[in-house]
Amino acid sequence: MIATDAFSYINVLDKAADASWIRSTCINNNIANVDTPGYKRQDIDFASVLKMELGRSKYTALDDKIKNLHYNHLNASVYTDSENFSYREDRNNVDIDTESVERASETIKYQALTDSISQEFSRLKLAMASS
């Protein structure tokens, strides 16, 4: 975490990329346990955590919201999806098709986040070179 306003967006993107990496790990574990009797899928919901933190200052510009974020509150935790109904006799609630689509989606999201971080650093580098 870099403690300056110039890196505010990078810090948020970094937290989002970390959450995306953890979610990918959860999805891979779900796929690995597709045949484990009684296994309940795991997931992470970073979007809700970020939305809640940004919503604390309702009538503020996005730049100000990002600048005033408490980054230590942007930690989404892994949860077990016990509520997802299973049609299987072994009570495993992992649907391999859904998990495969989620894995592909999360891979694209992670690549976009890391690309955005790289672009932010390129902009900062360009700004420092021109001054």
Image (cartoon, rainbow, N blue to C red):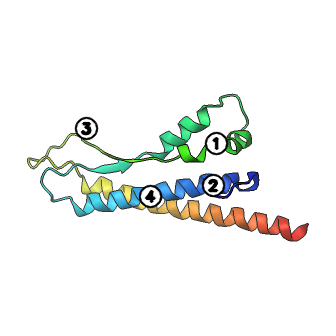
What residue sits right under mark 1 in the picture?
A: 69
Name which of mark 1 and mark 3 comes first in the sequence.
1
Label located before the other in sequence (4 or 1): 1
Position of residue 112 measured from the top left corner of the image (x, y, whole percent): 56, 61
Q: Identify the amino acid type marked 2.
A: Asn
CB atoms of marks 1 and 2 within 8 Å:
yes
- Asked if residue 113 shows in the view, the reply is yes
Mark 1 secondary-structure assignment: loop
- Quarter of the image for residue 102 reads bottom left
Query: Which quarter of the rendered picture does the C terminus lie within?
Result: bottom right
Q: Nearer the viewer, residue 97 or 20?
A: 20
- Locate residue 52, reporting x and y percent: 54, 35
Tell me the distance, in whole angstroms, between the alpha carbons under discs 2 and 3. Answer: 33 Å
- State the residue lying farthest toward the left: 89
Q: Secondary structure at mark 4?
A: helix
Q: Position of residue 92 (x, y in %)?
A: 17, 50
Mark 3 or mark 4: whose residue is earlier in sequence:
3
Disc 4 residue type (three-letter): Glu
Task: Give the residue at mark 2.
Answer: 11
Q: Amino acid at mark 1?
A: Leu
* Label 4 vs label 2, nearer the camera: 2
- The residue wearing badge 4 is 106
